[in-house]
């Protein structure tokens, strides 16, 4: 990896036609980010499909790459987006969400300051249709998150993690070593988060880093997302993967 790419944050966004109208807001929040001198970001927008509905909303900027592909879900779109730009770090930004000022710089600082951490997350607020925001109860204290802590909390609290995977910032080498996002119809980001926590320590920033839009067309609001049989199957696979990784004692960073 050359020096320029080594100091790049790859921002990946999976988008489908219904959420494309929110891309300009995501773009505005990304454009407002300030990074330390010598660092840059590159935004890869990957459509989960090949429609004509997304491209009108894609910003005209050299720092933005737009690609399309056959439908496979947001996890597939994010993973294939990794092929289109380099970068030492990967930041998730869903098409309908918005970063808060300083979010990227805080994520970067956490991992640059501590090479032993593999990933970072931050506090998230729900962004409601009327423009108001709502916080999540039970946010952890700011600072390191030990290996296994996310899985333990998730398993004991009805498959709800104490941190939000939509705010993930991760070392690219660790992300690719785990194969990217899980091949699931949903909860692919939770599956990745638990896998990351099974093999590495992470970080939680208590400042709000993401506004998570709640709207009628979002995938997590559909009936299929909460179908009990499918949900149990997804959770079983997510948990089995995380526990298997933990049992293998594979660590990041690798022991010298």
Image (spheres, rainbow, N blue to C red):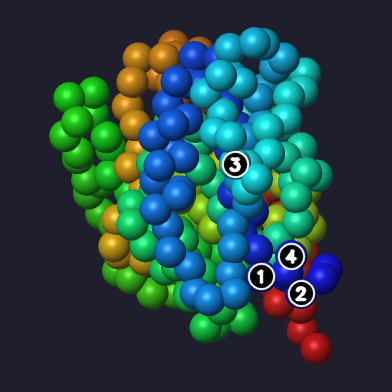
In the structure shown, which secondary structural element does the residue marked by tag 3 occupy?
A: loop
From the image, which quarter does the N terminus lie in? bottom right
Q: Position of residue 240 (x, y in %)?
A: 67, 45
From the image, which quarter does the C terminus lie in? bottom right
Residue at 43% over, 64% down: 34
How many residues crowd mark 1 within 10 Å: few (<14), some (14–19), many (20+)?
Answer: some
Q: Is residue 168 above or below residue 218?
A: below
Front: mark 4 or 3: 3
Q: Which residue is mark 4?
A: 5
How many residues crowd mark 3 within 10 Å: few (<14), some (14–19), many (20+)?
Answer: few
* Discs 3, 1 touching: Cβ within 8 Å: no
Residue at 42% over, 57% down: 33
Q: Is residue 45 above or below residue 241?
A: above
Which label's residue is closer to the chain start, 2 or 3? 2
Q: Which residue is mark 2?
A: 3
* Discs 2, 4 touching: Cβ within 8 Å: yes
In the structure shown, which secondary structural element does the residue marked by tag 1 occupy?
A: loop
Count of residue discs: 4
* Discs 4, 1 touching: Cβ within 8 Å: yes
Q: Is residue 181 left or right of residue 69?
A: left
Which label's residue is closer to the chain start, 4 or 3? 4
Numbered label attached to residue 61: 3
Q: Which residue is mark 1?
A: 7
* Discs 2, 3 touching: Cβ within 8 Å: no
| Residue 53 position by quadrant | top right
Q: Nearer the viewer, residue 72 or 85?
A: 85
Between the C-alphas of marks 2 and 4, the distance is: 6 Å
In the structure shown, which secondary structural element does the residue marked by tag 2 occupy?
A: helix
Q: Position of residue 253 (x, y in %)?
A: 71, 77
Between the C-alphas of marks 3 and 1, the distance is: 19 Å
């Amino acid at each position: 990896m050359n020096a320029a790419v080594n100091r790049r944050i790859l921002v990946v966004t999976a988008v489908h036609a219904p959420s494309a109208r929110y891309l300009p807001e995501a773009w505005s929040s990304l454009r407002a980010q300030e990074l330390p001198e010598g660092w840059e970001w590159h935004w890869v927008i990957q459509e989960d499909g090949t429609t004509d509905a997304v491209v009108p909303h894609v910003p005209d900027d050299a720092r933005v790459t737009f690609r399309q592909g056959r439908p496979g879900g947001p996890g597939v779109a994010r993973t294939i987006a990794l092929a289109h730009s380099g970068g030492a770090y990967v930041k998730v930004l869903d098409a309908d969400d918005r970063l808060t000022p300083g979010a990227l710089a805080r994520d970067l600082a956490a991992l640059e300051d501590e090479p032993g951490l593999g990933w970072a997350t931050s506090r998230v607020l729900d962004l409601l249709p009327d423009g108001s925001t709502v916080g999540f109860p039970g946010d952890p204290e700011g600072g390191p998150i030990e290996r296994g802590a996310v899985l333990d909390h998730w398993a004991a609290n009805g498959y709800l993690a104490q941190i939000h995977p939509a705010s993930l910032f991760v070392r690219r080498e660790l992300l690719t070593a785990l194969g990217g996002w899980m091949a699931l119809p949903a909860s692919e980001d939770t599956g990745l988060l638990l896998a990351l926590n099974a093999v590495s320590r992470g970080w939680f920033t208590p400042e709000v880093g993401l506004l998570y839009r709640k709207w009628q067309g979002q995938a997590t609001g559909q009936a299929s997302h909460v179908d009990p049989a499918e949900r149990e199957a997804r959770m079983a696979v997510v948990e089995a993967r995380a526990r298997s990784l933990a049992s293998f004692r594979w660590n990041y960073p690798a022991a010298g």
